[in-house]
Image (cartoon, grey):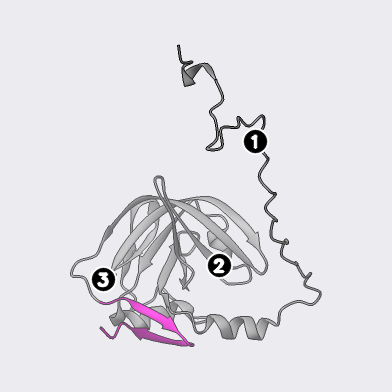
Amino acid sequence: MTASPDLGTPAATPSGVVPTSIPAPAPVPLPAPPVVTAVTAPFDPTAFRAVFRRHAAGVAVITAAGARPAGFTATSLTSVSADPPLLSFGISSTGSAWRTIADAGHVGVHILGEHQEEVAATFARSGADRFAPPTAWGPGPYGVPLLEDVQAWLVARVLARIPAGDHRIVVAQAVAGAPGGEAARPLLYHHGRYNALRH
């Protein structure tokens, strides 16, 4: 009777010799870890800004209610999560709008179209009365000032204000919002100027 291979009987090699052990595979040499060089000097802020001047960004206006409505132009708006719907933006801790946004429970987020370059300039201009005519706006959910004729808008509940250098990163959860009417091309900011998509 022939033993079944399932019983562990070693199989004969082509020469008829049954091996008594299987040699271990040769070790595979691992690649050397990368060399990490410590940064000993801070990166030049001027060069840092020059790099990001080449990064085209969408333009938004962030608003908040307070003793007086406050707002500023932002190019740092980011979608963080769809479920739950989270967003973030950066704001200078020395900017005039920060004092209001630091205390606000909710903020308004407005995506600007290419026809709103003057709105973006107004909300970026130091010392300007940003909500005076010709700015068209009204109160929205939770009393948040909402701009009219924008590409899209959101009202978001502030969840966190995270210190980051000379800025704060604000994380908020959308609680209301909608796209605007007819879709137009977005307003972009690139190389220190407002631009629009060319095609």
Q: Are marks 3 and 2 in contact (CB under 8 Å)?
A: no
Q: What residue sits right under mark 1 in the picture?
A: 22
Looking at the rendered image, the quarter that the C terminus falls into is bottom left
Query: Callout 1: 10 Å neighbours few (<14), some, many (20+)?
Result: few
Amino acid type at mark 2: Ile
Counting residues from the start of the chain, the first of labels 3 and 1 encountered is 1
Residue 139 lies, with reference to residue 134, above or below; the image says above
Which of 99 and 37 lies nearest the eye of the viewer?
Answer: 37
Marks 3/1: CA–CA distance: 77 Å
* SS at mark 2 in the image: strand
Which residue appears farthest toward the left when viewing the image? 182
Residue 110 lies, with reference to residue 117, above or below; the image says above
Q: Is residue 2 magenta?
A: no
Q: What residue sits right under mark 2 in the picture?
A: 91
Residue in the image at 46% along x and 15% along y: 2
Residue 101: x percent and y percent?
A: 53, 60
Query: Callout 2: 10 Å neighbours few (<14), some, many (20+)?
Result: many
Which of 13 and 82 lies nearest the eye of the viewer?
Answer: 13
* SS at mark 3 in the image: loop
- Location of residue 185 by image quarter: bottom left
In this picture, residue 111 sits left or right of residue 39: left
Residue in the image at 81% along x and 74% along y: 40
Marks 3/2: CA–CA distance: 24 Å
Q: Are marks 2 and 1 in contact (CB under 8 Å)?
A: no
Residue in the image at 52% along x and 84% along y: 53
In this picture, residue 131 sits left or right of residue 102: left
